[in-house]
Image (tube, coloured by chain):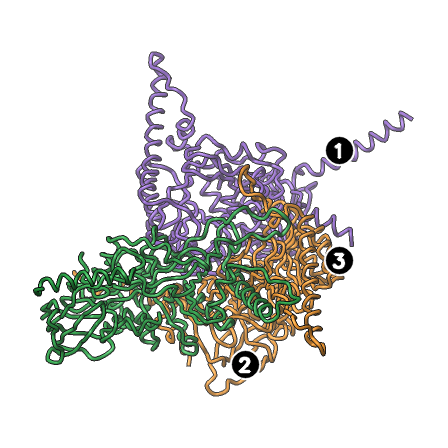
Amino acid sequence: MNKTIRNLLTSAVVLALAPLPVFSSGGNLLIKNGTILTVTKGVIAKGDILVLNGIIRQVGQDIQAPAGVQVIDATGKYVIPGIIDSHTHIALDGTNEGSEAITPEADVGEVVNADDTAILTALSGGVTMVHTMHGSANPIGGPNVVLKMKWGRPSEELIVHEALRTLKFALGENVKQSSRTITVGGPPPRYPQTRMGTNAIIRRELLKAKVYMEEWDRYNKLKASKTPPKNLLPPGKDLRMEVLSDLLRGKMVARCHDYQATEALEFIGLAKEFGFKVQAFEHAWEAYKIAAELAAAKIGISVFADSWAYKMEAAEGIAYDAGYCAKKGVLVSINSDSGERIRRLFNEASKTMKYGGLNETEALSLVTINPAIQLGVDRIVGSLEVGKQADIAIFNEHPMSSYTRCDMTIIDGDVYFDRGQYLKEREEAAKQAQAPKKGGRP
Amino acid sequence: MNVRQYLHLFMVILCLFAFALGETADVGPTYAIRKAKIVPVSGPVIEKGSLIIRDGLIEAVGPVDKVAIPEDAEVIEAEGLIAYPGLISAHTNLLLEEPTPARTAETPPGPAELIMGGAVQAQAAQTADLMIFKQLKPKKTTLDGFLKVGFTTVLVAPNRGIFQGQSVVVNLNGEKAETMVVKNPLALHINFTTIRGGYPSSLMGTIAYIRQSFLDADHYANAQTLYAKNPKGMKRPEFDPFLETLLPYLRDKKPVVFQCNDLEDIKRALKIIDEFKLKAMLTHANEAWRAAAVLKKMPIPLLVTLDFRPPNGSMYVNQGEDLKKKAETEIYPANAANLVKEGLRFALTTFGLNDGSAALKNIQSAIKAGLPKEEALKALTIQPAQYLGLAQQLGSLEPGKIANVILTKGELFDEKTQVEKVFVDGILWKF
Amino acid sequence: MTKRIFILCLIVGWAAGLFFAQTKPAKVIAIKGAKIVPVVGDDIDNGTILIKDGKIESIGKDVAIPNGAEVVEAKGLSAYPGMIDSYSILGLQEISGVSATVDTRETGRLNPQVFAIEALRYDSMHIPIARSNGITAAIVAPSGGVIAGQSVLIKLDGWTNREMVIKNPAAMQIEFPAIRGGRGGFGGGMGRGGVVAVDATRLIAELKEVFNKARYYNKRKNFASKNPSLPIPELDETLEFILPVLKGELQVMISVHSDRDIKAAIQFVKDENLKAVFFGVEQGWKVADDIKIANIPVIIGSLYDMPPVWDDGYDSLFRNPVILNKAGVKIAFSSMSASIAKDLPYHAAKAAAFGLDKKEALKAVTIYPAEIFGVDKLMGSLEKGKIANVVLSDGDILETKTNIKKVYIDGKECDLSNKYTELLEKFKKRG
């Protein structure tokens, strides 16, 4: 039991990088006597969760451990669904294909890097899943990917295939390169340099994609006809257009980096015009100004709690944004967008209680079930319910208290972070370092 | 005519022959290496043997009592010496005018896009048609450095851009490119790098770019085939020199070499190789041992470098000096040993190293880190010869093979060992 | 007609007078029924705080409320002293990405002549936000170079920058030259800059040289003032503004990070005989005893950061204050921010989550900073005679969910509206 993955990979020196313990329970666990915050089904005091083969099988009280199932004592602790970060850029080799304005072919799913120590950072903050995204350097960036934070496992095992396929769009200051100084004699600026141009170029690419789709439709029809022409050549496959076609066919949804209300409203218009789905606006610092429109269009937002005023378009980003929009019926998640903030997402979510008046469960939803819905994985994660995957975090205090600390993080029933074990190992290492070395000179 | 006159005549004829043959290598005298310990690599060690070199080839090899010494042979008494096949480095950037570091982003190809969405031409990425052979500028100092530690054959690859161009295999027999060539072109080299200031500027862009290029080549080939079959009534497909270059590699399965920086690059390459059914090799495949499970399912030639500096951008570089040092002194030197443990075959290369003594030092480090000596020898002789499709000519001491032979005092790779003599294409190298 | 207008004016004037009269500090305010957390001494349930002339007149369970006092019913609320942010850039930066709104760093290495107060934007949008979260005073510090300038201690209320001053200057800010590399971290990828050891040594030497020059400059000035025949030394603004530090009238705040640099900084403080406080001190836990022995208080930098090196452990920043506090070092927390200076209490709570005693955490945002900046006679706790900086909250002041109901600075109730609430109210009207 409790065979450490680290032992399995003794020579996986990468693990030496980070002294965090990684255990495999074989996906079978019984968590006992914790305060269970299911998020969707209330709170169970002194509750238990039985996990078999990585799936939550029972949530309740007085559950007996089947033979051979490891028991985790959570007395006095809080058990919550693993935290989900709806917008970050960790575990990738590169973030932006910023050379051109339109790069939907640049897929971050192709550059996942399972060695990124940010995964460990995420785990130490109870994060079990992230939506790791293309950057915001261009109007149409590229496809994003959803990962589980299974440190030590190969990159292909991190990818969550059940998630919605998402495509990154971006508007505003970043794509119009506001912070870039244009030097005389230097390279000419990239198109677009205005919000007008941003919309124009997105619209043009979507029109191009429509033509591309038509060409293929025409080809397929001819090919299927009884007498296909002799010199029938299939159109060239264009990765850029393929991705946009998938968006227009509803096989992907848009996640759009936006700050200002106007550009958001215009993007909603564009989405209507072309018939694609906007799943969420990212950052959305002026969402509170257009909460009604967002709620009506069923578009969520993925925002910071209060990190604002870092650029002009974030100058009206008020801390009430998340809470206010949530109350107005917008699906809200709190994201990190950072390899550091990711380990205190629970702290960030708790701020919506003060700014926005959410209750503890509502606040916790912003980093659990809500991002799960945004990513289309709420059937498998995001709350502690029977049948869902056992992505669980255990905190010493209520996770919405500022005094709280993540003590354990579990993914698919395996323990990927255990503070208790970590402290034990650190103590031992310190002892060894202090012990007099044998055979050395006196 | 006396014997002397005959000999003169013979020499003249020989010279004429050489002239007529044009660019072939000079043919040295016939050598008989006597009483050496012979390590043929392809067979058992001969404790006391002789090896005959004639016309640039190995004529005979065997125990002293089984090999007759030809009359015309210059005899080299080699008691106490050991004969090995010359070492092969299956990936280098040597002999080029200015060897540049392996992983630098390219300079901008030209002005950025001026019109809405106008694509930047990634010219720097499109040097697939470059024949690196044309850029060889051998210098004696470089040759000396590598020959001194026993290398007699190297693959020289281009080192710029994404589709970098086509490599050549040369014997280190002199300073004239034409006489050095063993095989040209050998392979198309692809690197997961980026183009600074142009497209693609990110790894994901690069991957898309590689994929799109093969898709385009495929489409191009389809159009060409269709047109060749039935040109009447069809618009002539436009000639594209870049895609044209890719065709033999895509359609005729000539070898493609992917340069990988880490485990993830290896997987990325495998995906593309599988997708386009390429015949491929992985170079700089230092973390291949971490992908052992996948590589056992999808065996592929692995070229692992003796340059132990972790690539820029790797976690070993950006987590502080301590880890970087650890990577160079402990982690990377153990790569080869780990591959042996995993039961994977591989060739060692000197890619990234510009001098021979560094290569030797690092071979020793790899051995210290657990690489069995005989595995090190195979990985520098018969294994690369096989990978390069040159196992008939190189990689072991067998009759009929090219006479790339080294004589050492002491076992090869040992710290005190000296390489006493080096034969390349049967010629005794003069340092 | 005119008469009517006159009367109307009179009424308006009277009403306005009433209005303004109410916002002026009432002579006596009695906060009644609150749970009082004085920070120094035990908590008082159901207590009363009597404020007179901006000061705490009396405090306790049985305080008689004089007639005519404005009574504030605070049942169910807690009363805390206002919190003090020990390092912020409030008033020096509005929007970090818009350089026109940033006044944090002067160019050049030696800038003792620049004063934060002189750039302080008293109506910064960030100040009311911090204030409405219970922060009533803050250090505002310049950064950059080696001597960054002079910081100021302000109260978060006032109609002009000078009105806000509690203590000016509060400290001369020194950014101790950091040594990069060697152990990774600090410049080794975690983005804390630093220079190579040689340069650090040179910069420290330069700093010491400046102090020496200043001492000599001072000596000459003194002699010249006593003896008119001696020349008055030419004005040197750099040296001039270091003098208060040399005379022991002003402390230095030294920004220092790694254990190695901290040790060097301790030595520097000793050598130069300075009154010092350290800031940042991320690896202070490694040399906690040295800091204790040197008796130098520590201002903990923002905990919204990563450990400087992986080897320190993922939680090193969080346990740093814990270890320092246990070693007996006086600590105070800081936001290092303008836009989220309001988060000061959460930094303290974060340390508490990792083992800092909750009461100590609270002290480290109230009485300890007051002591460090020599204003503990005036503020930092709820005690008789101190300035009435009082915060009324509906819960633990370090908890995120806690709402701040009233804030008094100098006994005056502050407006708790701010840019957040203004915009919220504006768009609430949309429905």
Q: Which residue is mark 3?
A: A293
Whether discs 3 and 2 lie on one chain: the answer is yes
Q: Colour of chain C?
A: purple
Can you give x and y, in whole percent of width and height, for residue B353 in the image?
Answer: 30, 58
Q: Which residue is mark 1?
A: C17
Going from the N terminus, do you reach mark 3 or mark 2 first?
2
Are the residues flagged by discs 2 and 1 in contact, CB closer than 8 Å? no
Q: CA distance from mark 2 to mark 1?
A: 69 Å
Secondary structure, mark 2, is: strand
The chain drawn in green is B
Q: Report the front residue among A414 and B431.
A: B431
Which residue sits furthest right? C1
Which residue sits furthest bottom? A67
Q: Can the viewer see residue B193?
A: yes
Q: Residue at x 48, y 77 (%)?
A: A72
Q: Which residue is mark 2?
A: A50
The chain drawn in orange is A
Q: Residues within 10 Å of mark 2 (few under 14, many from 20)?
A: many
The image quadrant where one finds the N terminus of chain B is bottom left
